[in-house]
């Protein structure tokens, strides 16, 4: 558990280094006369495209006293333009599939989406319109102010975020980086549309933007379209950027309380940015110290910490480095801090292993092949390279990483990990932590309009009304069963020189774990990382690093590697899955850590809320009510693990899917060799949960959480929505109209028109013999009662009368476009094949869904929804302050 979360750009850097120059002519780039930089990369995985428009402006450029200005403007970019109202913008985004988002950082703001390729021109027109014609109406800002303040409330209910807010002015004192991009309630209350318009007209210009388009497009044709649509937008003179931090960080201490189940101690430093020459070495140092082969993990093996690691966060001009130890709740934080400092001091003197450095480098360099497997991932990689790193392509990052040496890493460790420049942080779990100062906020971040009629769309937006033909999901290239009952599905895809294997063993610890042994299933799964009978933990991890491969054992298992290494990786994995060592020392370690963690978990508000939900929704004696406890974990012996493994891990309950650069014949040969001797004993177990009655509707149940100023509300009901019922697709359409998309009913009602909530979501969950439906939202205590009433009213309307044809067609378009977008990774529908097979639905399920969506009528959707959802049948649970007036 880390205090700092890695930023989007840091993730882009770390999860992949380069897209291969093998794309060659499939890359187009141009800088328009107005200064807009454009990069187009063809990736023909699917007829989908990632569009990422980055403005090189963030919170660092915010006016003094108004730290959240860039963030506020990001919100207002979803409130419409002079030619496209906010409601129309919601309709466009929702109909296109809803995969639109944005984020603000210190030095940039990015708007990104994943859409069907046929809709690219619509999005380009939309972004050009927003670049020059944003509404910035005072009335719209008054509504959106509440929204963004509600986001502040949510984030300040997170103890980790609050600590980060404390650390920024320490690490970046008296600089443009001493505040987060989020902003404050006080500054938003003082912000007016003039300030927002000044910021918009200063920084939102083509010569301050980068447009990256990746997917199933022709680069040359796409560049012409971009020039036609954006070329007439005038450039603007850009002011000077704010100065960078100067004075060194002075060692000091910060303490905080949390609602976590553990205590955390950490040391933080100012670190290199993405553009610094040390950035690649910093990434490798991060990987080495976070690796189980690195010098921090022995503290876990020695029972001195529950977790240990490094986290290097890099922005364009700034960075942070955090080393942390996680210890049991109520432990000795002073001793843990001393241990962390001593371990880091030893690293500074002795350095890190050259072999581990080379292993981490192999992983980074191999990742260039894996990045081709996702349109959205490759889009983010290119955007990060061109904007944050300010380089021509990800290949340049690859080149930088290839040159890193162990001497570079050790030199950086000596320079960075200086205790005289560290900020020491202690976060202690507490039942008496305090919420952020001030009252809760109202409103909602969201990207929607005002609701109501959409009106006439501009000509360029009208293509969204053309519902695309759904994708046809082809039968697997191979589908066979070995004599031992192991089902194997193969999908050959020559997208990149990589192969993936996904496996799932149909099991259910709630049913299969013996009484009094709760937790043995989880413990068994964690022990796979400690090696097989032929490869101990260290040998296993080195073998995988040498291949730059990944392998994870358990009931949900996987292995992936480059084509040339897949044989070796599969052999290692099969040995691990079929012959795990489960060594006594590892059993003792994992069980002890689980007991220590469980002791903390049982004291958290979140755990108490979960138990309240389960006891209310499930009948007495229902298997899912069984949970691990300190008592049950303490009773476990290694023999229990061996017995559970022998009874649960069996080939006739297993489905494997192999996807990628491999033929069916090759896959059959390799899987047979690896798993053909796997045997099962005894009859196949029954692992599906039984049916349950409808839940009672008790009084609202609240679990206090002293850290939270915002309530998290869950409205839940059980129903008869089984996974084989053909009406499940029409229920899905109704649910889409309720919460999926910017123009959905509950989003418009709770977020846009009333500002009661920050987010609202719903989920239809079907088991074999029953279903669960839930609506979740976060709101200030004073808004919870009204928000809940609005949810019930919208569900009553959905049950009482047929939905409008136009709204139903938008929901159909949304879901069908989502089906197209689900293929935007090479591994789609990997894992889903195995899941459907184990449910008895088969791969044809997706085609059945498409046909049902197309055939649905307003009357059939109403009937399906009415038969499954009871508007007045919810049990309501609240985490946080108990609102007044609820019963």
Image (tube, rainbow, N blue to C red):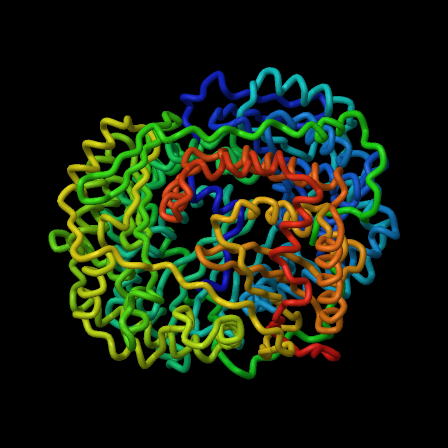
Decide: is 881 above or below 211: below
Q: Is residue 370 left or right of residue 619?
A: left
Decide: is 97 above or below 148: above
Q: Nearer the viewer, residue 510 or 458?
A: 510
Q: Position of residue 770 (x, y in %)?
A: 49, 59
Residue 843 visible to an observer of this rendering: yes
Decide: is 118 above or below 58: above
Q: Residue furthest left?
A: 534
Q: Position of residue 761 (x, y in %)?
A: 63, 56
Residue 17 visible to an observer of this rendering: no
Q: Is residue 493 left or right of residue 248?
A: left
Q: Is residue 167 left or right of residue 293?
A: right
Q: Position of residue 190 (x, y in %)?
A: 83, 61
Identify the image quadrant of residue 52: top right
Q: Residue at x 62, y 71 (%)?
A: 876
Q: Position of residue 475 (x, y in %)?
A: 39, 30
Decide: is 70 above or below 36: below
Q: Nearer the viewer, residue 680 or 120?
A: 680
Give the position of the C terminus as an image quadrant.
bottom right
Q: Nearer the viewer, residue 415 or 838?
A: 838
Q: Residue at x 66, y 50 (%)?
A: 863
Identify the image quadrant of residue 418: bottom left
Give the position of the N terminus as an image quadrant.
bottom left
Q: Residue at x 11, y 52 (%)?
A: 534
Q: Is residue 36 left or right of residue 473?
A: right
């Amino acid at each position: 558990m880390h205090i700092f979360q890695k930023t989007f750009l840091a993730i882009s850097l770390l999860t992949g280094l380069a897209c291969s120059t093998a794309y060659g002519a499939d890359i187009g780039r141009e800088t328009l006369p107005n200064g807009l930089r454009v990069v187009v990369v063809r990736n023909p995985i699917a007829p989908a495209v990632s569009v990422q428009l980055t403005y090189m402006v963030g919170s660092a450029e915010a006016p003094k006293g108004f730290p959240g200005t860039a963030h506020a403007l990001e919100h207002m970019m979803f409130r419409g333009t002079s030619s496209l109202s906010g409601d129309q913008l919601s309709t466009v985004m929702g109909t296109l599939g809803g995969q639109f988002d944005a984020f603000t950082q210190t030095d940039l703001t990015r708007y990104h989406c994943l859409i069907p390729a046929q809709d690219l021109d619509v999005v380009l027109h939309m972004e050009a319109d927003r670049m020059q014609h944003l509404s910035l109406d005072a009335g719209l800002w008054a509504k959106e102010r509440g929204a963004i303040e509600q986001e502040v409330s949510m984030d300040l209910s997170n103890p980790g975020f609050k600590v980060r807010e404390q650390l920024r002015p320490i690490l970046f004192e008296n600089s443009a980086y001493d505040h987060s991009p989020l902003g404050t309630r006080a500054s938003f209350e003082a912000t007016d549309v003039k300030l927002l318009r000044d910021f918009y007209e200063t920084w939102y210009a083509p010569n301050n933007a980068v447009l990256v388009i990746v997917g199933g497009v022709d680069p040359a044709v796409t560049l012409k379209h971009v020039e036609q649509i954006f070329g007439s937008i005038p450039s603007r003179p850009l002011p000077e950027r704010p100065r960078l931090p100067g004075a060194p960080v002075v060692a000091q201490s910060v303490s905080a309380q949390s609602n976590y189940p553990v205590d955390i101690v950490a040391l933080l430093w100012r670190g290199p940015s993405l553009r610094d020459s040390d950035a690649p070495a910093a990434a490798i140092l991060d990987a080495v110290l976070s690796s189980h082969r690195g010098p921090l993990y022995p503290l876990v093996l020695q029972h001195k910490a529950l977790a240990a690691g490094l986290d290097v966060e890099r922005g364009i001009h700034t960075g942070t480095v955090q080393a942390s130890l996680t210890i049991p709740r109520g432990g000795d934080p002073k001793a843990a801090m001393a241990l962390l400092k001593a371990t880091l001091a030893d690293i500074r003197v002795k350095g890190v292993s050259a072999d581990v450095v080379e292993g981490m480098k192999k992983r980074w360099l191999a990742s260039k092949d894996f990045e081709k497997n996702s349109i959205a991932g490759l889009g983010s990689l290119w955007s990060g390279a061109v904007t944050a790193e300010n380089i021509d392509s990800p290949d340049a990052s690859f080149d930088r990483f290839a040159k890193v040496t162990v001497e570079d890493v050790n030199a950086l460790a000596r320079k960075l990990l200086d205790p005289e420049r560290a900020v020491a942080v202690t976060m202690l779990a507490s039942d008496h932590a305090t919420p952020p100062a001030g009252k809760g906020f109202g409103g909602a971040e969201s990207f929607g309009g005002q609701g109501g009629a959409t009106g006439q769309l501009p000509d360029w937006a009208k293509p969204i009304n053309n519902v695309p033909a759904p994708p046809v999901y082809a039968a697997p290239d191979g589908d066979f069963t070995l004599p031992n009952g192991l089902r194997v599905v193969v999908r050959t895809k020559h997208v990149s020189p990589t192969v993936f294997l996904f496996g799932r063993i149909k099991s259910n610890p709630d049913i299969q774990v013996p009484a009094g042994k709760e937790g043995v299933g989880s413990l068994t799964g964690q022990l796979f990382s400690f090696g097989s009978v032929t490869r101990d933990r260290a040998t296993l991890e080195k073998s995988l690093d040498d291949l730059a491969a990944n392998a994870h054992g358990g009931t949900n298992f996987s292995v992936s590697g480059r084509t040339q290494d897949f044989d070796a990786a599969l052999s290692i994995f099969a040995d691990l899955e079929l012959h795990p060592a489960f060594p006594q020392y590892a059993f003792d370690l994992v069980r002890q850590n689980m007991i220590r963690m469980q002791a903390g978990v049982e004291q958290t508000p979140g755990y108490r809320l979960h138990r309240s939900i389960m006891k209310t929704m499930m009948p007495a004696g229902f298997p899912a009510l069984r949970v691990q406890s300190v008592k049950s974990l303490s009773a476990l012996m290694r023999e229990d693990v061996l017995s559970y493994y022998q009874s649960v891990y069996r080939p006739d309950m297993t489905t494997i899917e192999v996807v990628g650069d491999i033929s069916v014949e090759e896959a059959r040969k390799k899987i047979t060799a690896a798993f053909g001797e796997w045997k099962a004993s005894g009859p196949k177990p029954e692992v599906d949960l039984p049916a349950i009655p409808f839940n009672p509707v008790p009084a609202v149940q609240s679990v206090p959480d002293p850290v939270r100023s915002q309530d998290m509300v869950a409205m839940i009901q059980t129903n008869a929505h089984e996974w084989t019922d053909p009406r499940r697709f029409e229920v899905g359409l109704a649910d889409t109209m309720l919460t999926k998309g910017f123009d959905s009913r509950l989003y418009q009602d709770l977020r846009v028109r009333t500002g009661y909530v920050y987010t609202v979501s719903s989920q239809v969950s079907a088991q074999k013999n029953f279903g669960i439906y839930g609506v979740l939202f976060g709101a200030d205590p004073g808004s919870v009662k009204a928000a809940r009433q609005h949810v019930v009213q919208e569900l009553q309307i959905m049950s009482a009368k047929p939905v409008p044809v136009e709204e139903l067609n938008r929901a159909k378009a949304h879901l069908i476009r989502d089906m197209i977008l689900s293929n935007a990774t090479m591994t789609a529908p990997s894992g889903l094949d195995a899941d459907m097979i184990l449910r008895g639905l088969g791969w044809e399920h997706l085609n059945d869904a498409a046909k049902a969506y197309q055939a649905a009528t307003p009357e059939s959707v109403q009937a399906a929804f009415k038969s499954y959802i009871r508007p007045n049948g919810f049990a309501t649970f609240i985490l946080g302050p108990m609102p007044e007036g609820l019963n």
